[in-house]
Image (cartoon, rainbow, N blue to C red):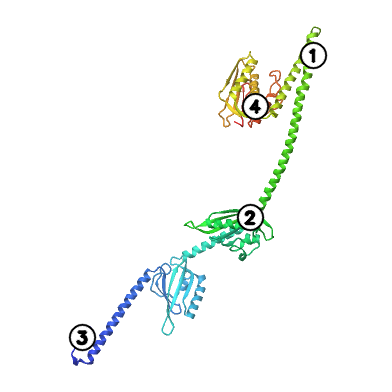
Amino acid sequence: MGDRAQDELPADAGGEVEIIAGTTRDVTERKDAEEALRASEERFRALITATSDVVYRMSPDWTEMRHLRGRNFIPDTDEPSFDWLERYIHPDDQPGVMAVIQEAIRTKSVFELEHRVLRVDGSLGWTFSRAIPLLDENGEIVEWFGAASDVTHRKEAEQALRESEEQFRTLANAIPQLCWMAHADGWIFWYNERWYQYTGTTAEEAQGWGWQSVHDARLLPAVVERWKHSIATGKPLDITFQLRGADGVFRPFLTRVMPVFDRDGKVVRWFGTNTDISEQRRAEGRVRQLNAELEIRVRERTAQLEAANRELESFAYSVSHDLRAPLRGIDGWSMALVEDYGGQLDERAQKYLSRVRAEAQRMGVLIDDLLQLSRVSRSPIESGLVDLSATANTVAGRLREAHPERRMEIAIRPGLKCLGDERLLEAALTNLFGNAVKFTASREVAEIDFGLDDQDQRPFYIRDNGVGFDMAYAGMLFGAFQRLHRGSEFPGTGIGLATVQRIIHRHGGRVWAQSEPGRGATFYFTVGMR
């Protein structure tokens, strides 16, 4: 524009034209500079508005603050602040902040510091503040331009992490186990105090792979191989080995190592514990010793029992052969006396001889019952599937033949079976059915029922409608020679139920009874082999 005006002016204008042209160019450059400055300031304001930090300006000596953007720390205002230190900085941090400021002023260097601040809402926060000095052409500070970032959440997270780590270390140092942590590659970087107390090593000696120094050299290769396998596969490690203590003694430790994974399933750390199992090993040794001693005692007692059984068997044979002969003599000579001299004896004498014969015969029955009790206790069990229903029918048939004068209604549930010794179980049923027949003698019709109960144990039972008994005396039922009724009413030796109990116990079961006087009785039994 200036050049075109100059060309159009008359030649005789001279210097005046040159002055006008220069003025035009100066104004244009100034306008361009102002426009550039305005555009720069707009960009600056946009940047300040967009930032999340506190942006501030300080006088050269930091006595006056002019902030451009306060966010939640400093209220937005263009008014200068001369008490910014007391208003915005935590009282405990003010001396430290001023010390760093004065050092930055002295050295004309950047100011950087993390400190606590008081927010606009009165809450406490943390900030990281950084300010740069602006210098003139003489190197003197004109002002400071700074920004402060809110680092409250990071500081709180760091504090929470420190507290968590402190709690972990306190716990790890309190437990009796040796604890340690390793990086993903197996490099151990931390041990608890218990490790150092036991091994007598230092942190420098034990870190990394230094733990190998307290291992048994003969077993160390296998331990290292197992540990490297876990590192390579990311699988937990469970192993027992010896560790040398500070006293030089090797003790057994159970070691368990668990991997810690990140969100992607990658091992980032290992956590391990070593538990001293010396006492456990000593206890196991004592148990083994006790078991060995017990086994010796069992063999000794078994030998003693076998010897006692042989003596009992010998006694049984003696009873069977030696006592039967005198009893037969007593009965026989008593009968001969009655037959040959009965006419010469009065009625009382004949009655006495009859009682002698009856007692001799009862003694014979008692000997038979004792021999049966001895046999069921000593004879080996030949286990097999036993049809109890068929066996009960056989026993009931014999009882009907033995008592043709009695009316007996015997109900036997079909299909009752169990595992056991058929011969011994037949002896048990014979005694139980015989007991039922005996104690229903006063009934016009004896009602006897053999079946399987629906109780939890599903026991077999034999029920009758006999005279029953008082449950207060139930504990005497299965003892040898124990009787709940007078022998004159219900003859017997008191051995039958003891024999039943011995047979059932040998089959791994139990036998019991329920009754009421005058309302019959029910005998239950289980067979453990069933």
Residue 63's place in the image compared with 266, above or below, is below
Residue 356's place in the image compared with 59, above or below, is above
- Reading the chain from its start, which is encountered first: label 1 or label 4? 1
Tags 1 and 4 in contact by the CB under 8 Å rule?
Answer: no
The residue sitting at the top extreme is 343
Foreground: disc 3 or disc 2: 2
Residue 151's place in the image compared with 4, above or below, is above
Q: Which residue is mark 2?
A: 241
Q: Which residue is mark 1?
A: 333
Few, some or many C-alpha atoms within 10 Å of disc 4 (few <14, some 14-19, many ≥20)? some
Few, some or many C-alpha atoms within 10 Å of disc 3 (few <14, some 14-19, many ≥20)? few
In the drawing, does residue 488 fall left or right of residue 226?
right
Q: Which mark is residue 259?
A: none
In the drawing, does residue 359 fall left or right of residue 257?
right
Q: CA distance from mark 2 to mark 1?
A: 86 Å
Question: What's the amino acid at mark 2?
Answer: Phe
Foreground: disc 3 or disc 1: 1
